[in-house]
Image (cartoon, grey):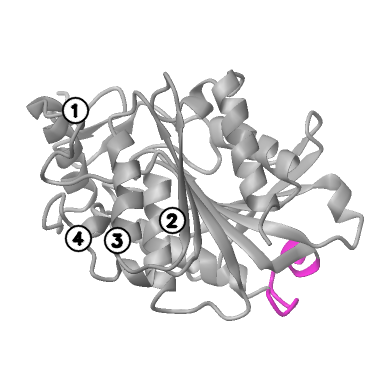
């Protein structure tokens, strides 16, 4: 007898009444390798043995054989906190390309996912990963690539969708707890997963679409107060002015249901008393995470160029 479906989030996942989760997307994985096309070397590492966190590291092969110090990007994948992994071919290919273009080291974080591990598990794991990166700042951490080749005065964070939500929440935490030995030069949030109980101007008012976002948020964070929870609606967070970075790039897409939230983030941040610089760039005619679904398109190339210049133009 088939177990009954409790929640059907097709085409992403189904949750059954016996608690089993069937992920319908983002389940493919690829092994780390030397990517011949980009010259990027990758490997998987466990982050402290007492935690559930791991990561895939990326570095230009040429840098391994030199004394060069490179900026570090800590990346958090998207997928609504439910699907995708750091081992996904989508993210593996994307980070090979980004690392090659920007000439950086990347740490792609594998955090625990909902609903088996509801929030704040992903936030806790992401903070553990940041502390692990920082543990290399004196050159005596467990990972040689970071000890030898990381420039800890130029560390960035980025992520798409739920990963961008993680980036924001890590910056809130950075405003309260400093990571010694690391200087964060900026963050890049791509199509950030933010929401709110009340629609913004130009945001969809369709009850079905709004309830879907709300229901998914409640599933990944069962103890939430709702979509005005500061974790998903930064405008309600009194700590916003203390955000622990001073340069922010937000990428939005014209057809993305979450588009207005990216623009609104800039608006509320600018009014909060935060003293940094925030920029929003919009991709015309594109939808959510288009750059991952169609990496060869012109707008994806433009966005890649913007991300690279954001990291390389840092003074």
86 and 180: which one is in front?
180
Q: Marks 4/2: CA distance?
A: 17 Å
Mark with earlier residue (3, 1): 1
Q: Marks 3/1: CA distance?
A: 39 Å
Circle 1 residue: 8
Q: Measured from the top left, where is residue 266 in percent x and y?
A: 36, 51
For image coordinates 79% across by 63% down, the residue present is 149
Circle 4 residue: 236
Q: Is residue 30 visible?
A: no
Q: Which mark is residue 167?
A: 2
Mark with earlier residue (4, 2): 2
Q: Residues within 10 Å of mark 2 (few under 14, many from 20)?
A: many
Q: Which mark is residue 169?
A: none
142 is within the stretch colored magenta = yes
Mark with earlier residue (1, 4): 1
106 is within the stretch colored magenta = no
Q: Marks 2/3: CA distance?
A: 20 Å
Circle 3 residue: 271
Q: Is residue 262 left or right of residue 198?
A: right
292 and 61: which one is in front?
292
Mark 4 or 2, closer to the camera: 4
Q: Residue furthest right?
A: 66
For image coordinates 68% across by 52% down, the residue present is 313
Q: Measured from the top left, where is residue 127 in percent x and y?
A: 45, 66
């Amino acid at each position: 007898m088939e177990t009954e479906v409790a929640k059907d989030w097709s085409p992403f996942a189904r949750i059954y009444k016996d608690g089993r989760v069937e992920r319908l997307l983002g389940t493919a994985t690829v092994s780390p390798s030397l990517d011949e096309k980009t010259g990027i070397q990758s490997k998987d590492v466990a982050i402290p043995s007492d935690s559930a966190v791991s990561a895939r590291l990326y570095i230009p092969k040429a840098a391994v054989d030199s004394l060069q110090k490179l900026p570090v990007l800590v990346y958090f994948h998207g997928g609504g906190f439910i699907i995708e992994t750091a081992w996904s071919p989508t993210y593996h290919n994307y980070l090979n390309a980004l690392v090659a273009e920007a000439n950086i080291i990347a740490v792609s974080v594998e955090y625990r996912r909902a609903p088996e591990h509801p929030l704040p598990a992903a936030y806790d794991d992401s903070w553990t990963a940041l502390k692990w990166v920082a543990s290399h700042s004196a050159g005596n951490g467990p990972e040689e690539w970071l000890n030898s080749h990381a420039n800890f005065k130029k560390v960035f964070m980025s992520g798409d969708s739920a990963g961008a939500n993680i980036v924001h929440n890590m910056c809130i935490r950075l405003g309260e707890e400093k990571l010694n030995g690391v200087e964060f030069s900026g963050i890049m949030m791509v199509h950030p997963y933010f929401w709110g109980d009340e629609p913004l101007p130009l945001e969809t008012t369709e009850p079905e679409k709004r309830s879907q976002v709300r229901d998914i948020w409640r599933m990944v964070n069962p103890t939430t107060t709702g979509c005005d929870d500061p974790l998903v609606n930064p405008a309600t967070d009194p700590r916003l002015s203390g955000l622990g970075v001073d340069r922010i790039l937000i990428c939005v897409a014209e057809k993305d249901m979450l588009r207005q939230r990216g623009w609104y983030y800039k608006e509320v941040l600018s009014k909060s008393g935060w003293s940094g610089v925030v920029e929003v760039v919009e991709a015309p005619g594109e939808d959510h995470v288009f750059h991952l679904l169609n990496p060869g398109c012109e707008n994806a190339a433009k966005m890649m160029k913007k991300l690279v210049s954001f990291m390389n133009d840092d003074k």
